[in-house]
């Protein structure tokens, strides 16, 4: 055996007997048990997101089985039974302490598939993925295993409709009415917001990352946007996936041949262009790490370049929820993700020469798919975009010295004057305290308050929960009263969050980051001209020293953990408490908080510089 990652069943009778039994049970030829193995994997969980996965896995498994055999034109391979991972639902758990398990679910998916891929030694894998975090964990495991593999999205849910008004509604709508005084109305929205099956349909984290996975090359572009119930997903797409995997195996094209520095940069640029979720700055470093690049913000794209591209080069092309009107099913009707990619390729923003899972370059794949022109309604052309600047911005400053803080500019609904916001700090030692205040006395929140939620980071919560519940309530409150309330946290946000909200502030409070030293009434300044997040009081070294000393005294008296940190009462939460790395490094779980990379490699530069031909003065190489 020349490749230790491929496990071949030898002639030992003990190791052969169950393998023969599996072959007979699956209806495949026992004579193939000594050949390289292929199989299908799927992600499962406790919400509507996952209800379509089983049918698609079974459909792909059946197509794969049909292609395997000893005869002419058949694949001489050993077929293994489908395997599944497990995760919790963001949509159900938001606003609860169980939400701490969401990001950890990405790690559990990676671990589960690591065991399956490595112990079974698959030589080829097709993955069907749903919800937010499992797709990223799946891609990370496939990159670490680095044998031919391909991913397909399970697909989005259709938007709901309010039968009384005809208004299009979704999960975010339901969270935004959580503070509504009429219980009957709240229940009415809840009953109609999420019909059918599939993952969140807006340009929330799921569709941001599915678009990312497509553009980075690991999913065929035309398979990203169709809804979960689209018959192509159990029909034509299943056949195509087997064909693509066969080609990858014959040509020995592996995930790390596809996911390279420029394909990662392409995917980040497209995430900006679709006004995508802030979670992309958490997941891109993890995907890069799994691809062999230890530090995304050094090896792939610096914060300076990220902000320059978002400010000056990359526009938002989609009128999509949560900041706009349409859902991914509408993008599918408008021609799919390939339309967006074609627009960006033609403008010079993407490197079209990177390889994809179809065996073609990105540009070749888009050309073969016959991507149509942008319709100017759902998807806008680069020349006349929906919004002139990209949807994301990373912030430095004295509260974010490592440029960890992330703002979804596409979702900001007001409050910036000359690109600056000044607010008064309202400190909450955890999400629960903020939700209690929003429930019991929402009138206490005033214009230009800056809500601080801390001790909810990767180590502090532990698990770095997202905060769709409080951001949705604050959004509804601000719209109703015509005010602006900002929110910043060392946790993260749902892709469905809108408003002046800043997440991933780090170093996190649990580790003694500056966010831990903010006090009620401090002035907080968000300056998008400088891309900084500052607490004015912390500009004074004496103030910082005094507050830090007081914080350290409290931590020392509590055995080394600040008492405001969440309770880590399971092995998984204990693992996060002691091993979670910062959001800038992906927020994953690594021994001694030292990022682990399997077979590190150099981030080779291609020389491609993202340009927008409609903004010739904004071209700049970094």
Image: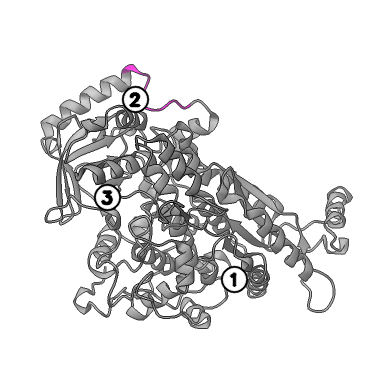
Q: Nearer the viewer, residue 536 or 96?
A: 96
Residue in the picture at 78% in, 62% down: 78
Q: Mark 2 touching mark 3, by CB under 8 A?
A: no
- Disc number at residue 253? 1
Residue 561 counted in the magenta span:
yes
Task: Indicate whether 554 appears above or below 405.
Answer: above
Q: Are marks 1 and 3 in contact (CB under 8 Å)?
A: no
Q: Which is more foreground, mark 2 or mark 1?
A: 2
Neighbours of disc 1 within 10 Å: few (<14), some (14-19), many (20+)? many
Q: Name the quadrant containing residue 448.
A: top left
Which residues are the magenta region? 557-568
The residue singled out by tag 3 in the image is 403
Q: Is the magenta stretch mostly helix, strand or loop?
A: loop
Percent across and percent down for residue 587 are 42, 45
Which is more toward the observer, 430 or 484? 484
Q: What element carries label 1?
A: loop
Say above or below: 91 vs 342: above
**Badge 3: residue crowd in 10 Å (few <14, some 14–19, many ≥20):** many
Secondary structure of the residue carrying tag 3 is loop
Lower sequence index among marks 2 and 1: 1
Instruction: From the image, state whether disc 2 or disc 3 is nearer to you.
Output: 2
Query: Mark 1 and mark 3: span between their CA atoms?
Result: 35 Å
Residue 528: % across, % down: 18, 54
Residue topped by disc 2:
564
Position of residue 614 in the picture relative to residue 178 (left or right): left
């Amino acid at each position: 055996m020349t490749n230790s990652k491929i496990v071949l069943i030898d002639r030992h009778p003990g190791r052969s007997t169950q393998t023969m039994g599996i072959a007979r049970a699956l209806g495949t030829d026992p004579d193939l048990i000594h050949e390289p193995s292929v199989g299908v994997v799927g992600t499962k969980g406790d919400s509507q997101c996952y209800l379509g996965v089983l049918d698609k896995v079974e459909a792909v498994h059946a197509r794969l089985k049909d292609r395997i055999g000893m005869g002419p034109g058949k694949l001489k391979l050993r077929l293994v039974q489908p395997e599944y991972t497990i995760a919790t639902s963001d949509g159900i758990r938001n606003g609860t302490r169980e939400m701490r398990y969401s990001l950890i679910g990405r790690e559990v998916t990676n671990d589960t598939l690591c065991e399956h891929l490595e112990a079974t030694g698959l030589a080829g894998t097709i993955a069907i993925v749903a919800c937010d975090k499992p797709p990223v964990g799946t891609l990370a495991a496939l990159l670490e295993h680095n044998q031919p593999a391909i991913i397909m999205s399970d697909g989005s849910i259709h938007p709901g409709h309010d039968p009384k008004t005809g208004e299009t509604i979704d999960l975010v709508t339901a969270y935004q009415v959580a503070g509504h005084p009429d219980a009957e109305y709240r229940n009415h929205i809840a009953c109609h917001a999420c019909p059918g099956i599939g993952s969140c349909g807006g340009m929330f984290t799921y569709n941001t990352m599915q678009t990312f996975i497509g553009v980075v090359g690991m999913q065929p572009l035309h398979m990203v946007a169709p809804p979960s119930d689209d018959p192509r997903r159990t029909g034509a797409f299943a056949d195509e996936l087997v064909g693509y995997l066969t080609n990858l195996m014959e040509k020995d094209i592996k995930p790390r041949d596809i996911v390279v520095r420029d394909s990662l940069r392409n995917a980040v640029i497209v995430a900006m262009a679709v006004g995508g979720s802030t979670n992309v700055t958490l997941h891109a470093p993890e995907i890069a790490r799994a691809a062999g690049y230890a530090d995304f913000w050094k090896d792939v794209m610096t914060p300076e370049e990220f902000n320059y591209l978002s400010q000056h080069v990359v526009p938002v092309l989609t009128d999509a929820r949560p900041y706009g009107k349409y859902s991914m099913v509408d993008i599918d009707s408008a021609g799919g993700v390939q339309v967006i990619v074609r627009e960006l390729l033609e403008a010079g923003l993407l490197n079209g020469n990177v390889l994809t899972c179809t065996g073609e370059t990105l540009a070749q794949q888009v050309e073969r798919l016959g991507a149509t022109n942008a319709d100017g309604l759902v998807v806008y052309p680069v020349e006349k975009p929906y919004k002139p600047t990209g949807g994301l911005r990373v912030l430095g400053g004295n509260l974010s010295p490592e440029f960890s803080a992330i703002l979804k500019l596409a979702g900001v609904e007001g409050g910036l004057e000359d690109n600056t916001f000044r607010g008064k700090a309202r400190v909450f030692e955890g999400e629960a305290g903020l939700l209690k205040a929003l429930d019991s006395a929402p009138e206490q929140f005033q214009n230009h308050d800056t809500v601080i939620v801390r001790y909810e980071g990767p180590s502090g919560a532990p698990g770095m929960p997202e905060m769709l519940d409080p951001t949705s309530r604050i959004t509804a409150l601000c719209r109703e009263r015509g005010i602006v309330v900002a929110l910043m946290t060392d946790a993260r946000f749902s892709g469905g969050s809108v408003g002046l909200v800043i997440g991933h502030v780090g170093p996190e409070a649990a580790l003694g980051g500056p966010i831990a030293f903010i006090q009620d009434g401090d002035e907080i300044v968000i300056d998008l001209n400088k891309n900084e997040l500052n607490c004015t009081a912390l500009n004074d070294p004496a103030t910082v020293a005094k507050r830090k000393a007081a914080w350290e005294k409290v931590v020392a008296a509590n055995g080394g953990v600040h008492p405001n940190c969440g309770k880590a009462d399971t092995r998984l939460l204990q693992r996060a408490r002691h091993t979670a790395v910062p959001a800038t490094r992906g927020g994953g779980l690594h021994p001694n908080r030292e990022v682990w990379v399997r077979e590190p490699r150099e981030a080779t530069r291609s020389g491609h510089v993202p340009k927008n031909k409609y903004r010739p003065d904004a071209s700049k190489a970094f």
